[in-house]
Amino acid sequence: MGVARYTKDEKDRITDVELQSGIHVKACYGPEDLERVGFSYEKDLAPPGQYPFTRGIHAEGFRSRAWTTRQYTGFGTPEESNERFRLMISHGQTGLNVAFDLPTQMGYDSDDPMAEGEVGRVGMAIDSLRDFEIAFKGINLEKIGSGLTINAVASIMLAMYQAVAEKYGFDPKKISATPQNDILKEMIGRGSWIFPVEPAVNLIGDTIEYSMTTLPRTNPVSICGYHIRESGATPAQEIGYAILIANAYIDNVLKRGYDVDDFVGRFSFNLNVFGNIWEQVAKFRAARKLWARNLKEKYGVRKDSNMYLRGLFGGGGYGLTKAQPENNIMRGAYYALSAALAGAQTIALCSYDEAYTIPTPHSAIISLRTLQLLMDEIGLRDTVDPLAGSYFIETITKEMEQKIEEEMEKIEKIGGITQAVATGYVQRLVSQQAYEYEKGLQSGELKKVGLNIYTEGEPMEVELHEYTGESAEKQIAALKQLRRERSDADVKRTLTELEAAARAGKNVMPSLVECCKAYTTVGEMARVFRDVFGEFQEPGLF
Amino acid sequence: MNRRPIKILVAKPGLDGHDRGAKVVAHALKEAGMEVIYTGLHKTVDQIIRIAVEEDVDVIGLSIMSGAHIPITEKLVKKAKEEGIGDKMVVVGGVIPNRDIPKLKELGAGGVFPGGTPFAEITGFITANVKS
């Protein structure tokens, strides 16, 4: 049971199942269902690695390459985070997924009054290149790619990543960063926005334009349906909105006179896994098809590999419960199974204690082991897209495709996604849905084990990650020392150049790299942007 | 009888942007007949107190997901007293470990409602305890 709505008769027999996206599931599927939804093998499926990539982007799936494991990691000082990064890598993790604290995400230095109480709390505190030097020490940045969970100031953090790579002698052309860099989703959910829509989208355009030549292996934007879903969107809305948001970023770069095939191949996606397993699998398969078709038909993309939907499919935090927290380990395993069955490129899981706080090393490694177990023990690498050809899966994949298209049309009708976010339409819609969902849980209409069914047993206390103010004090002391040691003249010069570039509407990336190399702080660079661009005015809730 | 519906400020203090919970609770309070004002994100304690004074609310509700609930609540209660609205009820929700609930109450939170608390419990508590 779970996230779907079930209707039963008096004998407890299921008479109807309605998935979150509005698809009704039948008791049994056959060839007549494929006919009903207009399924065509050539048009809807085709072999793996071939357009429209429903079955996956590689001909041999996980045989040719296992998914990357990338647990969200980072807390306290750069020293503490570096130690945790190395721990995860030493346990076989194949990529990093860097968590920044809220002041860093919001463009404030650790000693800013706005940062009080938050330094190093939900992620690593980063003030300057010096902190990145510590955080990435001893990590081969040409071998390990880094997801950077940063949005409003993603341009700054990408510049800093290039600067730290160069400092350690790595070739920028060989490093692979994946900043989230998706500001429209921050405005829908998660809330780490700073600047208004237009300049914020322009900054994303700058990172994409800059990466084409300078950071060709970097994925400058990772469109996050994940957080849109966490905010209350249905799976169909999650994908529909993500594709529309990606299009908004494409349009920004096209206006600069580039060919879409020059850059869109580096787009990636960060999507959510929780809820009904079949709906998740159908969602990812439909998403690959729709993204490829969108690029081919709307934008005229020619090269096949540029049409790949490459995705981190992450176990959704909203699926976890505080009640009976150990159940979250099993939930994570099923979410990972869904992601693997659906052909993810990268998988990450929320750990079982994340309904409380950021994970301990113990819980983070359980998540990593869950992923490794599926890969090396259970057989998820054996064959590509193992559910393909199932009457059920192919039918609901097709139905999911239609639901996603309907959601996209609704947004296009009211003026497009940028407008729908700027006016708060999407935010109001998903928060209303979140409220309805919550009511469903509280009334028991939606079932959740340990929360509203099978609640027996004593409440358990879990060992939690402890936050102490000590890391914050150390970080602030290190920042003060940096301010004394760096060249004020270099800082002033690079900030002046940054401001001039921002005011002139030039690509700010080269100036940001120079700022970073001069040990200008994140707060100082963000201050320039705040002064030039202003701040986003959040639309009302009701 | 009741002079007016209970007026409550749902506030998101600090830098945390996770607002699903705040918005969901705002909907529930509104549906329970209360007048709800939502501050939006990234508000300082000073800004929240200013809105509370200007709007003459009965209750200030804080939604905190980052783990900074103790320092923020402490600061807000202190500021409320300084601004002469120390008698207003303060309630706190969000990602709150059980072990922190007594501490929050000691700091002056009237009610503490960790994520997942039934709406009826929240609205019932507020209705029963607001000084009219």
Image (cartoon, helix red, strand yellow):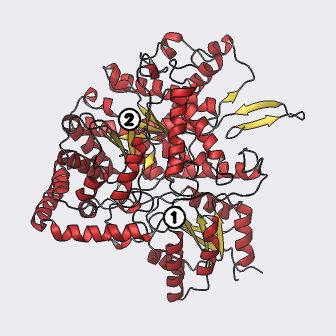
In the rendered image, residue B46, in percent from the top left (x then y), is placed at: 45, 78
User: Which quadrant of the figure contains the C terminus of chain A?
Assistant: bottom right
Residue B107 drawn above or below residue A128: below
Residue in view at x 47 percent, y 50 percent? A188
Secondary structure beneath dot 2 equals strand
Residue in view at x 33 percent, y 71 percent? A112
For label 2, count other residues whose C-alpha is less than 10 Å away and answer few (under 14), some (14-19) or many (20+): many
Q: Amino acid type of disc 2? A: Ser
Residue in view at x 54 percent, y 81 percent? B77
Q: Visible in this render: residue A53?
A: no
Q: Amino acid type of disc 1? A: Gly
Secondary structure beneath dot 1 equals loop
Q: Residue A118 carries which label?
A: none
User: Which residue is at the front of the view, A286 or A460?
Assistant: A460
| Residues at circles 1 and 2 in contact by the CB criterion of under 8 Å | no
Q: Visible in this render: residue A262?
A: yes
> Is A444 displayed left or right of A503 in the figure?
right
For label 1, count other residues whose C-alpha is less than 10 Å away and answer few (under 14), some (14-19) or many (20+): many
In the rendered image, residue A120, in percent from the top left (x then y), is placed at: 40, 62
Q: Mark 1 points at which residue?
A: B67
Q: Mark 2 points at which residue?
A: A268
Chain under numbered label 2: A
User: Which quadrant of the figure contains the N terminus of chain A?
Assistant: top right
